[in-house]
C-alpha cells in the first residue's frame, strides 16, 4: 500500500469526514462487541464474581486493552496511509475532550449553586 495522493480539496474533506465519523462508529462497534464478550464471560462464570478464575481475569485484561490497541493501531496506520483520515480522527477526539470539559464546567456550576444556596441561608439566617 502506498500513501494516498490528494488531488483536490474535496478528497481531503471527504477523508476528514470519514475520519471524524469513523471514530464514533468504530468505538460504538467496539463498545457493543465488548458488552457481548462480557455477557458471555458472565454466563461462563455462572453469574458469580470471580467464578471463572484466571481465565476470566485474562479475558478481562485482554478486553480492557483491546479498544486502546485498535484505536492507536488504526490511527498510526491512517497517519501513514491516509493522513487526512487521521486528522479527522484527532479532531473528533479533540471535540469530545472540549465537550467533556464544558459539561464538567456546567456540572460544577450547577452543583456549586445547589450547594451554596442552603449554606448561605444557614450563614445569613434565611433567604
Image (cartoon, rainbow, N blue to C red):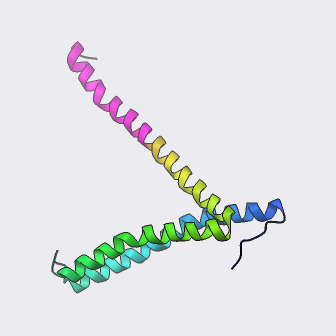
Residue drawn at 46 percent across, 73 percent down: 30
The location of residue 29, given as percent across then percent down, is: 49, 73
Tell me: residue 44, above or below residue 104: below
Q: How many marks?
A: 0
Q: 106 left or right of 38?
A: right
Height in image: 29 above or below 45? above
Magenta span: helix, strand or loop, mainly?
A: helix
Residue 93 is covered by the magenta coloring: no
Q: Farthest residue to the top: give it.
A: 124
Position of 44 with respect to 108 (left or right) is left
Q: Quadrant of the C terminus?
A: top left
**Residue 97 % position (x, y):** 49, 49
Front residue (pair 95, 90): 90
Instruction: From this view, report whether residue 119 is shown above or below residue 34.
Output: above
In the figure, is residue 95 to the left or right of 44? Answer: right
Residue at (37% x, 70% y) in the render: 65
Query: Extreme right residue here?
Result: 8
Residue 84 picture quarter: bottom right
The quadrant in which the N terminus is found is: bottom right
Q: Is residue 31 visible?
A: no
Q: Position of residue 106 (x, y in %)?
A: 43, 38
Q: Is residue 105 magenta?
A: yes
Query: Which region of the structure is painted magenta?
Result: 104-124
Question: Which residue is rendered at x = 59% and y = 61% of the image?
Answer: 89
Camera-side residue of 23 and 55: 55
Q: Residue drawn at (59%, 67%), measured in percent from left and top?
A: 22
Amino acid at each position: 500500500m502506498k500513501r494516498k495522493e490528494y488531488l483536490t480539496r474535496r478528497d481531503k474533506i471527504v477523508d476528514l469526514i470519514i475520519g471524524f465519523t469513523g471514530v464514533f462508529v468504530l468505538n460504538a462497534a467496539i463498545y457493543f462487541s465488548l458488552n457481548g464478550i462480557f455477557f458471555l464471560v458472565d454466563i461462563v462464570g455462572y453469574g458469580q464474581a470471580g467464578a471463572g478464575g484466571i481465565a476470566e481475569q485474562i479475558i478481562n485484561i485482554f478486553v480492557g486493552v483491546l479498544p486502546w490497541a485498535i484505536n492507536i493501531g488504526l490511527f498510526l496506520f491512517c497517519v501513514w496511509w491516509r493522513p487526512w483520515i487521521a486528522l479527522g480522527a484527532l479532531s473528533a477526539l479533540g471535540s469530545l475532550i472540549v465537550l467533556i470539559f464544558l459539561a464538567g464546567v456546567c456540572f460544577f456550576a450547577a452543583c456549586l449553586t445547589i450547594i451554596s444556596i442552603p449554606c448561605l441561608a444557614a450563614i445569613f439566617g434565611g433567604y
